[in-house]
């Protein structure tokens, strides 16, 4: 990998690409955990994303995986009900458990890392299918959960 020298925006020290440990972020009900995310780290341990578009790319990657989650259907404007996406029976009011689904990601030829999408799962009393309550429950919370990951990683606000 050939990259020009990157200087830290905060102290102008030289940055190196390093792999971060566990970074998590939450925007309830969605919880994200990232393992081994690449980042620029300077000698004073200031951190920055490996590219200005990295966090946006991360959001797009997560959104492209949303359809892998079976989802119920939201019904009602004021008083919401959630129906099984499979058989249409009303889902239980409380989730059965949380499930963390891991995905491997690679940003532009860098070392692969892992992200876990952790969501409450609801089991249908009719057909037994396990699912998230609605696709919106995941989709709508991805950007804020990524902002939380950004902050937890110690990245500045940009993009
Ligand atoms: Zn620095
Ligand atoms: Zn069902």
Image: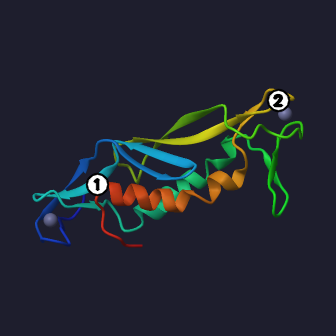
31 relative position to 4: left or right: right
- Residue of label 1: 39
Choose between 88 and 20: the one closer to the eye: 88
Residue 6: assigned label = none
Instruction: Assess disc 2: are there few (<14), some (14-19) or many (≥20) residues with their C-alpha within 10 Å of its C-alpha.
Output: some
**In the rendered structure, are the residues bearing label 2 and label 1 in contact, judged by CB atoms less than 8 Å apart?**
no
Q: Nearer the viewer, mark 2 or mark 1?
A: 2
Q: Is residue 142 left or right of residue 52?
A: right
Q: Is residue 62 above or below residue 68?
A: below
Between residue 61 and residue 150, name the one nearer to us.
150
Report the side of 15 relative to 134 (left or right). Answer: left
Foreground pick, 96 / 72:
96
Ligand 2 shows up in the quarter that is: top right
What residue is disc 2 on? Answer: 125
The residue drawn where x is 54% and y is 53% is 61
| Image quadrant assignment for residue 101 | top right
Residue 123 position in % (x across, y down):
74, 32
128 in relation to 58, above or below: above
């Amino acid at each position: 990998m050939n990259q020009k020298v990157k200087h830290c925006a905060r102290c102008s020290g030289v940055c190196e690409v390093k792999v971060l440990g566990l970074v998590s972020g939450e925007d309830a009900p969605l919880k994200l955990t990232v393992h081994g995310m690449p980042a620029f780290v300077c000698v004073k341990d200031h951190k920055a994303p490996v590219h200005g578009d990295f966090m946006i790319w991360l959001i797009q990657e997560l959104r492209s995986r949303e359809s892998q989650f079976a989802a119920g259907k939201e019904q009602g404007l004021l008083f919401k009900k959630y129906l099984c996406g499979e058989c249409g029976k009303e889902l239980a009011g409380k989730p059965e458990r949380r499930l963390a689904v891991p995905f491997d990601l690679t940003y532009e030829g860098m070392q692969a890392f892992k992200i876990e999408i952790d969501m409450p799962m609801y089991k249908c009393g009719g057909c037994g299918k396990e699912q998230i309550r609605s696709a919106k429950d995941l989709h709508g919370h991805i950007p804020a959960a990524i902002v939380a990951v950004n902050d937890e990683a110690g990245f500045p606000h940009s993009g």
